[in-house]
Image (tube, rainbow, N blue to C red):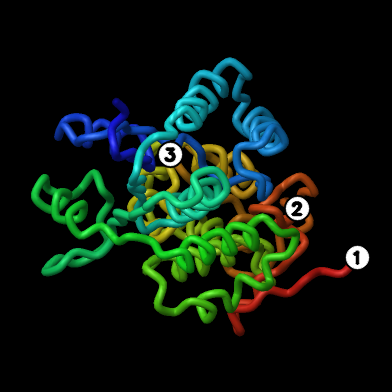
Amino acid sequence: MASSILHITNGDSTTQILSNLNFDGEIITWREMLCEGKTTIDVGSENFWKTRFDFFKSSYKTTKKTFIDYTLKEYRNLCNQKQQNEIVLWFEYDLFCQINMVAVISWLKRYRKGRKISLVCSGTLKNKTGLHALGHLTQVELLNHYKNRVELTLDDIEYADYIWQLYCSDSPLRLETVHNFSPMSPFVYLEEAIKAHLQRFPSIKNGLNKLENQILDIANKQQLENQNQLIGEILKNQGFYGFGDLQYANKLQTMKKLFSSFSPVKLNRKGKKVLDNQLNFYGQIRSDFSYLGGSKKYSYLYVNDTDKLLKITS
């Protein structure tokens, strides 16, 4: 007989932790990073996976075999899990996890209607400072998180699905006030994640977004011997993004015209002028093929003084 609980985790490390602790139920790993590249509303459809593969192929040179073996086989395993009474979601506070989380909830809303869905979400801890990933929790802390998991109401599920739809739309503007729509929702980290998302659009000041400016600032202030050290410092200071080293290595490739060297790490004259807002790099970094969710990244500018987005009219 099938187990009554299905766990859907944010990654292989969490899956390994749950396996080591002998959690009851089946465990499925959600292997995606929907915070990057173009997304479509219809999670799990042929169109959805084609769009995602096209992104991975063009941005990360991912082969079809790798995509099938790593992502699609696990997704098909998820599709085969139909008998469980409760589905437990294991996600973290950062943008990477929060976008994956609302996408999974959207899928569950469509294909697992009526099931009990509960959420384990790590972030702040009582008597501890900072934000904590699931992998940083002690065994006692992790079990307490599980014991105190939050059961999602129908309204919560509808809200998460709505956020996913807005994220996949061709305009990010409605996301600016979305936290006002459900201030009492159990998704306590979603508002900060959305703010971090909106700050990924290019700044009106120099054409780079908050994260890209932060990379330049770290490179300029610290004496780093190579790209790996630079990525290590970025990872330590990334706040709510939750990206991995592979994503930052890819990001540095798009910014290499602002560096004179990565060994040691040095900005060139142009990089320093962009960092000081003396030069706008928008025209040189702009791409019609760069998407954040359903929106073209370079069709909007982030206005730092008002924390609002401005649509660029053609």
Q: Residue at x 40, y 78 (%)?
A: 184
User: Label 3: which residue?
Assistant: 245
CB under 8 Å between discs 3 and 2: no
- Considering only order in the chain, which callout, 2 or 3, is on the residue closer to the N terminus? 3
Q: CA distance from mark 3 to mark 2?
A: 23 Å
Amino acid marked by disc 1 = Ser
Amino acid marked by disc 2 = Arg
Please provide percent x and percent y for residue 42: 66, 45
CB under 8 Å between discs 1 and 2: no
Give the vertical position of 263 relative to 88 (above or below): above
User: Label 2: which residue?
Assistant: 286
Q: Residues within 10 Å of mark 1 (few under 14, many from 20)?
A: few
Secondary structure of the residue carrying tag 3 is helix
Q: Nearer the viewer, mark 1 or mark 2?
A: 1
Kindly indicate the quadrant of the structure image that contains residue 202.
bottom right
Q: Is residue 182 left or right of residue 162?
A: left
Q: CA distance from mark 3 to mark 1?
A: 35 Å
In this rendering, the count of numbered labels is 3
Quadrant (top left, top right, bottom left, bottom right) of the N terminus = top left
Q: Residues within 10 Å of mark 2 (few under 14, many from 20)?
A: some
Q: CA distance from mark 1 to mark 2?
A: 14 Å
Q: Residue at x 55, y 56 (%)?
A: 212
Give the vertical position of 176 relative to 216 (above or below): below
Q: Residue at x 58, y 78 (%)?
A: 177
Numbered tag placed on residue 314 in the rendering: 1
Give the vertical position of 297 relative to 79 (above or below): below
- Considering only order in the chain, which callout, 1 or 3, is on the residue closer to the N terminus? 3
Secondary structure of the residue carrying tag 1 is loop
Amino acid marked by disc 3 = Asp
